[in-house]
Amino acid sequence: MIYAFLDTNICIRIMSQGKPGCELNHFHSLKTLVEGNVFRLLVPEIVLLELEKEHRVNTKEYDNEFGKLKKGLSLATSWSEMEDVKEYLQTIIQNKKEDKIKDSKKHYFEILEFLESKDVEFIPFTVDILLRGKRRLMAGRMPKHGNNSDQDAFIIESLISYFEKCNDEKKQLMFCSENHKHFALECKSRQKDRIFNLHPIIQSDFPQSLYTIDLERMLDFTKGYESLPEPSNSKITKARQKLEELEIIEGFDFESDDYSEHFSNLVTLINEESAKQFNDEFLAKLSPEMQQKRASLLDNANQLLADCRSCKSWDDKSEYKLPQWLENVSEEMICYTSLSNLIRIKDNLQRYFKIHEEEDSQQEK
């Protein structure tokens, strides 16, 4: 089983939406994957305590930072003829501050609801963890000593205490934190993205681990064809050019069989290339366990779809509504979609099948 940990700073990034890498779509994918039992999220109580504190001072921090922007704007120019521009920008800053505070509160309660749900593994902050954390600091078994060293040590000891009781022989840990200087070492790499490993002084007490600095990187192995660059090859280029030629013909009938045939051909070529890219760049790099997980979800989705279509109540209208139940993923591309999408599609089809089962039952009465 894969286990995951999110440091408090990652939760704060989700709250603020101030930097890329922790967008809400990644958070929603995380929720889906945890609820779908793809991996287990470990939530030390210390993270909830730190998050509560951040939420309490959040509004004051926004007041201070937006106040600096307003002050800087006032000092930027003293020319009276720019007064209308300054007032306009001041209004924008004020409105943005109010929106940020409102959205941050909304995101906080959404995060908190998830972190306190039955779907995660809560690790209480005990006296034993406190003492073990203090001993770790005294022994110098933390990569960096600073203002937050106590909390960092408590987090490490909380996770260790969980794994000490975990009998999973194949356990792995995904550790996600922006504070790489507190927990990790940067690896020398020719790749564009920076790569980190959990610091050896910590890794020695943990199972095999993957260290990432944001949610997007942590969930990289769950991506689907949607995350790949738009596919292109000579056949796709020619098919697109032919379609564009038809589109500029004055009076051309876009509902004609000719246009539909060329459009369908372009979609088929794009899907084929997307599938090839997914197999080469994603699927081949997945662990056997993750490949099996995808295969199992796909089998379930396909069986549920077949069950839906076997219902007496299934008709053309049901088929027309099907795309929205498939997360708007075309049927032939379901096997290449993201892992979170696969879970959603499977869950959606379970609900759709139940609806048709109930309709069948009503018709039989």
Image (cartoon, rainbow, N blue to C red):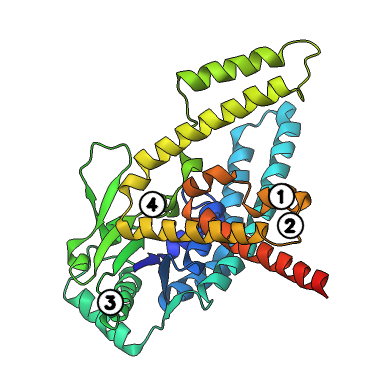
> Mark 4 against mark 2, which lies toward the viewer?
2
Amino acid at the residue labelled 2:
Trp
Q: Is residue 313 above or below residue 324?
A: below
Q: Residue at x 18, y 66 (%)?
A: 201
Q: Earlier in the sequence, mark 1 or mark 2?
A: 2
Of residue 73 and residue 271, the one placed in the foreground of this image is 271
Q: CA distance from mark 3 to mark 2?
A: 52 Å
Q: Which residue is mark 4?
A: 221
Q: Under tag 2, what secondary structure? A: loop
Q: Which residue is mark 1?
A: 319
The reply, left or right, for residue 327 in relation to residue 11 is right
Q: Which residue is mark 3?
A: 160
Amino acid at the residue labelled 1:
Glu
Q: Earlier in the sequence, mark 3 or mark 4?
A: 3
Q: Residue at x 37, y 53 (%)?
A: 213
**Local crowd size for mark 2, using a 10 Å CA cut-off: few (<14), some (14–19), many (≥20):** some
Q: Residue 278: which quarter of the image?
A: top left
Q: Residue 183: percent from the left, percent from the top?
A: 28, 62
**Local crowd size for mark 1, using a 10 Å CA cut-off: few (<14), some (14–19), many (≥20):** few
Q: Which residue is mark 2?
A: 314
Amino acid at the residue labelled 3:
Ile
Q: Check contact, mark 1 vs mark 2: CB within 8 A.
A: yes
